């Protein structure tokens, strides 16, 4: 039986074990829930995107993953097949580049058919105090997170509409209305994504396209460790690992998130189970935002 949180292989090194896969909830959706649907997942080779690709595949969708690295995509293709027993397709694409995005759209259409589900998950992040933020640094993040989300979604608009049940899922960040200290570029981009989502929902509802945002709290993926907190710790005793363990105690549900927590929300929102839900931002954070005060 396939499960949402396939346990890490015994051979997994310290970096892999940081992507918590301890959750062993049986896969909660029918394997035919998304049958005949084609899905595109940006940033689908690692972390949360990889878990989303696995979950959509397990729910019956034909999935195309994309990121800038052909090497990571090849590894991810094998990982999805290992976890789900089904193939995914992949194409390198920098979401900041219009030509790349146009090629992606044509690849998906030729290989699998019209996309009914677009998951905007690709993102870039690095710590930088606001007063030190250069224009290039700001642009590097806005171009990836915001422009990339807009560009990919727009490229697939005709396909989404043609299916009659298009669904756009964009990944934001929990409690972004409070800002994102140290990461003001990413906070601004993610806040704008929530607004884009609402605009798309209103404008495209009449075309049968739903648009929703998922706003995760902290999920200690390898990408977060490398880009936000330095190198992954080599053991649970490392200061970084200790800080995260302490952070978990601030969460009402007393744990940090897993990629699979986010993936389950994506499957639900992209399916007909959520057929009358559009324009929402769903926070997936174990209740952490409730502890931040009024
Ligand atoms: C604690 C829980 C909350 C977690 C919330 C959210 C988490 C996440 O979003 S996780 C996603 C993390 N994953 C990634 O970030 C992976 C992808 N990131 C990247 O590939 C890069 O960081 C990049 C896209 C931003 C690099 O883009 P590129 O166009 O190649 O940028 P340049 O190298 O040309 O640099 C442009 C500009 O930005 C400055 N810069 C880039 N990276 C960093 C860095 N790591 N630290 C500081 N500054 C950086 C760079 O210095 C350039 O500015 P100038 O120096 O003024 O030219
Ligand atoms: N982990 C967390 O705590 C939280 C994460 N999020 C969001 O969840 C999503 C996934 O993050 P996570 O899995 O943790 O981190 P990852 O670093 O694993 O994922 C980011 C992905 O984006 C891809 N990517 C980056 N830039 C581009 C680009 N220009 N074009 C195409 N792909 C690109 C990367 O692949 P490649 O480098 O190969 O291009 C990578 O696969 C992001 O949107 C993030 O902001 C939100 C809240 C909390």
Image (cartoon, rainbow, N blue to C red):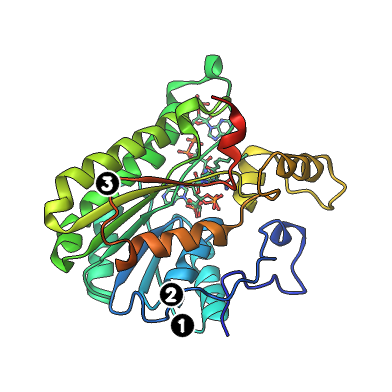
Quadrant, the N terminus: bottom right
Viewed as shown, does residue 65 lie left or right of 15? Answer: left
The residue that mark 2 highlights is: 57
Q: Residue at x 45, y 74 (%)?
A: 29
Query: Tag 2: Cα neighbours inside 10 Å, few (<14), some, or many (≥20)?
Result: many
Mark 3, Cα crowd under 10 Å, few <14 / some 14-19 / many 20+, is some
Up-down relation of residue 28 to residue 66 (above or below): below
Separation (CA) of disc 2 from disc 3: 24 Å
Estimate the spatial distance between the alpha carbons at disc 1 and disc 3, rounded to whole Å: 29 Å
Q: Is residue 204 above or below residue 144?
A: below
Please indicate, yes or no, whether residue 91 appears anywhere in the rendered image. Answer: no
Q: Which residue is mark 3?
A: 151
The residue that appears at 77% across and 40% down in the rendered structure is 246
On screen, residue 192 above or below 47? above
As drawn, the label of residue 267 is none
| Front in this rendered view, residue 157 or 128 | 157
* x, y percent for residue 68: 45, 54
Considering depth in this image, is 221 or 23 the residue closer to the camera?
23
Q: Earlier in the sequence, mark 2 or mark 3?
A: 2
* Residue in the picture at 57% in, 36% down: 290
- Image marks 2 and 1: residues in contact by CB distance under 8 Å: yes
Nearer the viewer's eye, disc 1 or disc 3? Answer: 1
Tag 1–tag 3 contact (CB < 8 Å) = no
Q: Is residue 157 left or right of residue 111?
A: left
Q: Quadrant of residue 207?
A: bottom left
- In the image, taking residue 33 as reference, residue 81 lies left or right, namely right
Indicate the secondary structure of the residue bearing disc 3: helix
Name the N-terminal-most of marks 2 and 1.
2
Q: Which residue is mark 1?
A: 86
């Amino acid at each position: 039986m396939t499960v949402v949180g396939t346990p890490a292989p015994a051979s997994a090194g310290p970096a892999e074990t940081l992507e918590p896969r301890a959750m062993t909830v049986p896969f909660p959706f029918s394997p035919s829930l998304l049958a005949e649907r084609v899905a595109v997942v940006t940033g689908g080779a690692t972390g949360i995107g990889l878990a989303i690709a696995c979950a959509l595949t397990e729910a019956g969708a034909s999935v195309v993953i994309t990121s800038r690295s052909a090497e990571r995509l090849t590894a991810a293709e094998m990982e999805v097949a290992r976890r789900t027993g089904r193939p995914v397709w992949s194409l390198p694409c920098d979401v900041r580049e219009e030509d790349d995005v146009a090629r992606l759209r044509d690849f998906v259409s030729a290989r699998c058919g019209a996309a009914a589900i677009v998951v905007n998950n690709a993102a870039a992040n690095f710590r930088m105090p606001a007063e030190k933020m250069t224009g290039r640094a700001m642009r590097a993040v806005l171009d990836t997170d915001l422009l990339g989300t807009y560009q990919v979604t727009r490229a697939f608009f005709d396909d989404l509409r043609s299916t009659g049940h298009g669904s756009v899922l964009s990944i934001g960040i929990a409690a972004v209305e409070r800002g994102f200290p140290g990461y003001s570029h990413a906070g601004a981009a993610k806040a704008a994504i929530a607004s884009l989502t609402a605009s798309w929902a209103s404008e495209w509802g009449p075309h049968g396209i739903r648009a929703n945002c998922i706003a995760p709290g902290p999920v200690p993926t390898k990408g977060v460790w490398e880009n936000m907190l330095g190198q992954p710790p080599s053991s649970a005793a490392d200061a970084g690992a200790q800080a995260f363990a302490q952070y978990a105690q601030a969460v009402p549900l007393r744990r940090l998130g897993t990629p699979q927590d986010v993936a389950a929300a994506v499957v639900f929102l992209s399916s007909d189970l959520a057929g009358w839900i559009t324009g929402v931002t769903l926070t997936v954070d174990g209740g952490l935002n409730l502890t931040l005060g009024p």
